[in-house]
Amino acid sequence: MTQPVSPPRGSSTGKVPPAQPPAWRGVLVRADVRTLSLLGVLAALILIGGITKPDEFLDTRNLQLVLTQASVIGVVTVGMTFVIVSGGIDLSVGAIVALASVWATTLATQEYGFAGILFTAMVVGVGCGLVNGVLIAYGAMVPFIATLAMLASARGLALQITDGKTQIVTVPSVLDLGERDAYVLGIPPLVLVFAVVTVIGWLVLNRTTFGRRTVAVGGNPEAARLAGIDVRRQRLYLYLLSGLCCGIAAFLLIVLAGSGQNTNGNLYELDAIAAAIIGGTLLTGGRGTITGSVLGVLIFTTITNIFALNNLQSDVQQIAKGAIIVAAVLVQRRTASTT
């Protein structure tokens, strides 16, 4: 006698329940919504700029200026995104930019020309990142405290080098990069450098083992350690990367301003952190996107440009930035809870 076949456990009809969609699809949906939201904000700002100052805002030279100004803080933000994704923070990026810019524009450095200025800026940035990385990874210092100490030290050293004076760049090959004759198909060289750094940063974070280790360390350091990742060495590399980005940004700022000042990079740390946050990077680590961070930079730079063209006060500009940050975070939380 044939025994009846009982339906699978958990099913009253005998039918196998439909397979659940993989988890990565939810992540992609959230990422798409964040990107579209940021693009919507940027489009709204462009519309506002076009309505309030159509002749000035939509002028080709003004748009080139916006992209050029975004390039400096944008390169810093790429490095900051990696650090925050790993669960860290770097409050010293602005001070490192200042120190690298004044060290690279001393009379002794300028004697070595273009290569000397570029090399010095990058070495100073990497050196400061090395100090941060060693203190945090191997000295077990809290990132907030270690980078805060670097902020104060780098600012002080930059002031000591310049004695409070502006150091004028006299190397023609450096100054020429800021001229319109150096533009490639209407694109300033600084913007091209920013684009290259962005593409490399995206590839490293999303397509390499280094990027996967960064996300793992930020998500759960202990689990990453048990999986065979050298967490301390990874953190050291990340602060070296942040320092390198600061060195590149310092050189771009030298080209843009034609000088080195101890006040360079003021509040860059706040702008970089804010841009990364509204771009979808979690302050607790474990998640981040280079694309979102770059859009955040473009949003803030566009706001600054619109306020400048309309002769609005800077305090109102800061309030607008704060409102955008709060709105972006609320949108992210709403998206995370509904997907």
Image (cartoon, grey):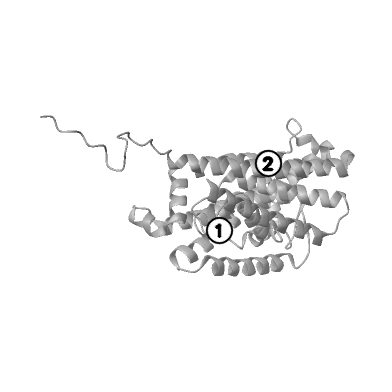
User: Where residue 171 sits in the image (x, y, percent)?
Assistant: 75, 47
Of badges 2 and 1, nearer the viewer stands 2
User: Where residue 242 sits in the image (x, y, percent)?
Assistant: 57, 54
In the image, 18 versus 131, the foreground residue is 18
Residue 283: mark in rendering: 1
**Amino acid at pointer 1:** Leu
User: Where residue 241 sits in the image (x, y, percent)?
Assistant: 54, 52
Which comes before the other along the chain, label 2 or label 1?
2
Within the image, what quadrant is residue 224 found in? bottom left
Give the side of residue 189 with respect to residue 225, left or right: right
Give the side of residue 136 with respect to residue 117, left or right: left
In the image, 193 versus 211, the foreground residue is 211
> SS for tag 1?
loop
Q: Are marks 2 and 1 in contact (CB under 8 Å)?
A: no
Is residue 212 at least partly visible in the picture?
yes
Pointer 2 local density, CA inside 10 Å: few below 14, some 14–19, many at least 20:
some
Instruction: Give the quarter of the figure containing the N terminus.
Output: top left
Give the residue drawn at x 78%, y 41%: 46
Is residue 120 at least partly visible in the picture?
no
Residue 258 lies, with reference to residue 164, above or below; the image says above
Within the image, what quadrant is residue 277 found in? bottom right
Separation (CA) of disc 2 from disc 1: 22 Å
Q: What residue does disc 2 label?
A: 39
Give the residue drawn at x 72%, y 63%: 262
User: Where residue 167 sits in the image (x, y, percent)?
Assistant: 76, 58
**Amino acid at pointer 2:** Leu
